Image (tube, rainbow, N blue to C red):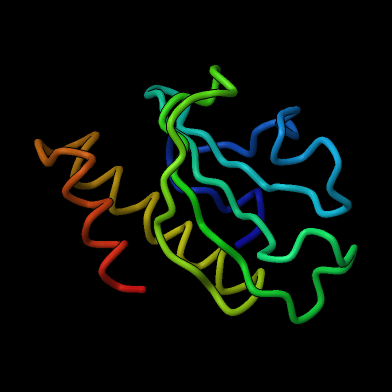
């Protein structure tokens, strides 16, 4: 998934400046929903290596991107960056379909993604 192919309402966020990223050589990629208060983070599992090649990733949900102390919840893990992007895209589309356009609660789809780990 390239940044040009983001699901409707999602955009790549500026690099967060918080404890997750301040002293780590690996950038955290964050995508935020433009109309609601959530973001998806793609984080290399081992941020100390300085390389993303072959690296496994954690996919987190950040409930308040404006608040660096906002709630962060692990959604699932992925084998590499490409797989993490695929999971993120699936979550974004599901969120759009079920929460933004539907009446499903966010915690319901979070539970579904957490079970798929």
Task: Find residue 34 and report its horizontal and vertical position in percent.
Answer: 47, 25
Quadrant in which residue 53 is drawn: bottom right
In this rendering, is residue 60 above or below 78? Answer: above
Q: Position of residue 48 (x, y in %)?
A: 84, 60
Q: How many marks?
A: 0
- Which x, y percent locates residue 67? 54, 18
Foreground pick, 63 / 84:
63
Which residue is nearer to you in this view: 25 or 34? 25
Horizontal side, residue 11 vs residue 64: left or right? right
Q: Residue at 46%, 65% (x, y): give it.
A: 87
When the figure is inspected, residue 52 is found, relative to residue 43, above or below; the finding is below
Q: Give the residue furthest to the top.
A: 66
Q: Position of residue 15 (x, y in %)?
A: 75, 34
The residue located at (75%, 28%) in the rendering is 17
- Relative horizontal placement of residue 5, taking residue 76 as reference (left or right): right
Q: Residue furthest left?
A: 103
Q: Is residue 99 above or below residue 35?
A: below
User: Which residue is rendered at x = 75% and y = 81% of the image?
Assistant: 54
Q: Residue at 30% of width from left, 73% of height from top?
A: 116
> Quadrant location of the C terminus?
bottom left
Q: Is residue 5 above or below residue 18?
A: below
Left or right of residue 33, residue 18 in this image: right
* On-image quarter of the N terminus: bottom right
């Amino acid at each position: 998934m390239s940044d040009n192919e983001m699901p409707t309402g999602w955009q790549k966020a500026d690099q967060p400046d918080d404890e997750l990223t301040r002293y780590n050589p690996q950038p955290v990629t964050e995508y935020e929903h433009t109309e609601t208060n959530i973001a998806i983070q793609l984080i290399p599992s081992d941020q100390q290596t300085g390389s993303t090649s072959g690296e496994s990733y954690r996919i987190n949900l950040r409930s308040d991107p404006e608040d660096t102390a906002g709630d962060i919840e692990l959604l699932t893990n992925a084998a590499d960056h490409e797989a993490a992007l695929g999971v993120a895209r699936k979550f974004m589309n599901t969120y759009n379909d079920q929460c933004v356009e539907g009446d499903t609660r966010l915690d319901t789809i979070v539970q579904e993604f957490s079970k798929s780990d």
